[in-house]
Image: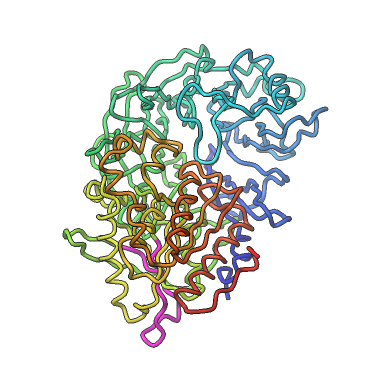
């Protein structure tokens, strides 16, 4: 037995979420998520990880802590909604900025805002943070927020697009950046001289990424610019911390400049991702861009690598970059002059890069499909990886992982991970589950807390995790071949790799099912209407009617670039709902009502279409969840319902309604 057999044990596993290295290179700080005592929610805490010692916990509060950043002096800044013990009035529980002294002692609250404090960056004696601000007179903001709340007003008047993002409404407040000096504090230790750097930002800083130059003099930030017909582009701007003066650093009509974002230690260059605008015949392409901070002149690097994280080498000669690659996510070294090289050679995924001040090491979160994230030290010359003691021990997975590949009908190689139960053999072949990833521009290459294949393996299933067309890490051609051709091209790739898997003697080719979420849910719906090889299909947060989806999602402008104007031919060709009359496979539909990326209308329409067509089906509905099912109890209900549905239709067992949804 393992933690994967009982979902309640699984959701209680602590999770390492981030990693930040101190300026002197002596310790890391990590945000660790764990189950709260009530068992109904998760909390977070900061842990210290000495580079040559054992981890220890730094913070403990009911509200938890996030966004850890080191000051140059080695103190830790973080955000938390914990109450301030020195305040006369606790006020609304919005995140405030706290400082934990390096020398020890209690954390103290150093800054608050009526709309809370979000992302934080610091350099020198400067701290810059993001906050949600109502339009109008700033001095009266707290009173205006209270008046709005007391009057029971939740209405938001929009004059632009978008209006929602993933799982939350946009407005009535909008993001601005504020700056303060760490050495300027009142008698209670709170920051004084807090200044609004971006009073005219409007919606430009929505979902912003920003960083500081090493001297703390300049903020480099992403800046959204509205375009006609609901479109937009994202520029990079430089904001003078002393004056608030803003200049455009780089802007291109057909590209966005986005996260990840980092300034070189010598303060002369910025590295970020440059993503080209797509079109009917122009696929997504993302590359590392390095530009001069003085002139804004720059160029793209490593065009086949989609940057996920970047970190500068201490001497500013190169950037360390993590990007999907052949079912892994290695660390690459990209010199400012010269060709990039792969630093790590294992079958792992890395994130949260931190270069040591002496240039000898790169610290990162180290994980894989069969390995939960934990801290690691990478030799910057040899790429040798050493795991560090982790504040959250990694669970042992209940099975074995292997890799398979197939040749698609157009000659392209399609590869996949295959997770097998330990006892799967020719004498005991395992039932088979195809699990299709979301995105669609993504890859199965890392540990998944939400889409956990090892839970299914613990219950006896062989789980195939394929990277078909549109997957990252296989060059631009892999994305191009599926662009604007989602269903047919992806299905052909999936058929090829599934055929290879089912030819194995340790897999039962008769007891097979398919499932997926988001784009994977779209493909699950497509499979349902275009093949009858599966005994059951589970579709989560899925796209059903593309025309409907493209006009109700939180980012219609993005999808319209690929599919065209509403009602165009591509919607008709690729929408799964047109094959409703071909569906005979039992389906489990799952959706959260707070999902704004794939709105609940997709599931409601699919559910009604299945009912009126008398397709055997069930609908697992979460009124309080979004695109992901995040609450521990709801995660239990999700997995238990999926397992019960598969047991009925794949294993031939009698349907038993799980206790979690009884």
Q: Is residue 127 visible?
A: no
Describe the colour scheme in one phrase.
Answer: rainbow
84 left or right, relative to 18: right
Quarter of the figure with the C terminus: bottom right
User: Which is more toward the observer, 638 or 429?
Assistant: 638
377 left or right, relative to 51: left
The image position of residue 413, as x and y in percent, is 22, 60
Query: In the rendered image of this protein, does residue 247 appear above or below residue 151?
Result: above
104 left or right, relative to 284: right
183 left or right, relative to 280: right
* Residue occupying image coordinates x 58% and y 45%: 29
User: Which is more toward the observer, 458 or 161?
Assistant: 161
The image position of residue 290, as x and y in percent, is 32, 31
* Residue occupying image coordinates x 40% and y 67%: 585
Query: In the rendered image of this protein, does residue 202 appear above or below residue 644?
Result: above
Query: In the rendered image of this protein, does residue 312 appear above or below residue 87?
Result: below
The quadrant holding residue 562 is top left
In the rendered image, residue 585 lying in the magenta stretch gets the answer: no
Region rendered in magenta: 416-435
- The residue at the far front in this view is 612
**Image label count:** 0
In the rendered image, residue 417 lying in the magenta stretch gets the answer: yes
The image position of residue 581, as x and y in percent, is 35, 60
The image position of residue 136, as x and y in percent, is 60, 14
* Residue occupying image coordinates x 29% and y 50%: 486
């Amino acid at each position: 037995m393992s933690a994967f057999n009982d979902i309640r044990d699984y959701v209680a596993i602590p999770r390492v979420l981030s990693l930040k290295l101190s300026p002197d290179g002596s310790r890391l700080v990590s945000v660790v998520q764990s189950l709260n005592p009530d068992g109904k929610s998760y909390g977070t805490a900061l842990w210290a990880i000495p580079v040559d010692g054992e981890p220890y916990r730094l913070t403990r509060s009911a509200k938890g802590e996030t966004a850890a950043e080191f000051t140059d002096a080695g103190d830790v800044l973080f955000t938390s909604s914990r109450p301030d013990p020195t305040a006369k009035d606790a006020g609304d529980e919005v995140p405030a900025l706290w400082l934990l002294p390096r020398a020890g002692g209690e954390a103290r609250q150093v800054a608050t805002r009526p709309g809370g404090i979000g992302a934080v960056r610091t350099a020198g004696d400067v701290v810059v943070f993001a906050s949600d601000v109502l339009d109008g007179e700033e001095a009266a903001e707290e009173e205006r927020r209270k008046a709005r709340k007391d009057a029971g007003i939740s209405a938001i008047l929009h004059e632009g697009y978008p209006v929602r993002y993933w799982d939350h409404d946009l407005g009535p407040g909008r993001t601005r950046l504020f700056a303060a000096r760490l050495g300027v504090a009142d008698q209670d230790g709170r920051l004084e001289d807090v200044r609004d750097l971006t009073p005219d930002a409007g919606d430009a800083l929505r979902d912003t990424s920003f960083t500081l130059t090493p001297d703390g003099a300049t903020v480099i930030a992403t800046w959204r610019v509205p375009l006609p017909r609901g479109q937009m582009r994202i520029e990079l701007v430089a904001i003078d911390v002393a004056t608030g003066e803003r200049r455009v650093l780089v802007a291109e009509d057909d590209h966005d400049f986005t996260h990840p974002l980092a300034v070189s230690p010598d303060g002369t260059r910025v590295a970020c991702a440059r993503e080209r605008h797509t079109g009917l015949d122009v696929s997504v392409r993302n590359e590392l861009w390095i530009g001069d901070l003085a002139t804004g002149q720059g160029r793209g690097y490593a065009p086949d690598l989609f940057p996920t994280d970047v970190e500068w080498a201490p001497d500013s000669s190169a950037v360390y970059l993590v990007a999907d690659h052949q079912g892994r996510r290695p660390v690459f070294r990209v010199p400012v002059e010269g060709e990039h090289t792969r630093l790590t050679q294992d079958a792992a995924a890395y994130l949260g890069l931190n270069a040591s001040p002496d240039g000898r090491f790169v610290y990162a979160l180290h994980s894989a499909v069969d390995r939960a994230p934990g801290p690691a030290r990478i030799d910057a010359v040899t790429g040798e990886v050493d795991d560090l003691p982790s504040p959250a021990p990694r669970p042992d997975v209940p099975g074995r992982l292997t890799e398979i590949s197939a040749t698609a009908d157009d000659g392209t190689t399609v590869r996949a991970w295959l997770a097998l139960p330990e006892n799967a053999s020719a004498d005991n072949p395992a039932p088979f589950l195809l699990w299709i990833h979301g995105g669609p521009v993504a890859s199965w290459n890392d540990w998944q807390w939400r889409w956990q294949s090892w839970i299914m393996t613990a219950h006896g299933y062989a789980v195939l995790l394929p990277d078909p067309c549109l997957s990252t890490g296989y060059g631009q051609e892999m994305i191009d071949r599926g662009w604007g051709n989602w269903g047919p091209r992806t299905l052909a790739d999936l058929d090829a790799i599934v055929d290879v898997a089912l030819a194995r003697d340790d897999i039962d080719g008769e007891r097979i099912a398919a499932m997926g979420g988001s784009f994977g849910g779209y493909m699950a719906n497509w499979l349902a209407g275009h093949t009858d090889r599966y005994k059951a299909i589970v579709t989560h947060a899925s796209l059903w009617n593309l025309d409907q989806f493209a006009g109700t999602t939180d980012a219609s402008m993005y999808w319209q670039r690929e599919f065209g104007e509403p009602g165009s031919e591509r919607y008709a060709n690729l929408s799964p709902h047109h094959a409703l009359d071909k569906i005979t496979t039992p389906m489990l539909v799952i959706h959260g009502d707070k999902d704004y990326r794939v709105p609940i209308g997709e599931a409601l329409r699919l559910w009604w279409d299945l009912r009126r067509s008398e397709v055997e089906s069930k609908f697992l509905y979460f009124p309080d969840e979004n695109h992901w099912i995040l609450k521990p109890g709801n995660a239990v209900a999700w997995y238990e319902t999926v397992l019960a549905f598969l047991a009925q239709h794949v294993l031939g067992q009698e349907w038993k309604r799980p206790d979690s949804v009884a």
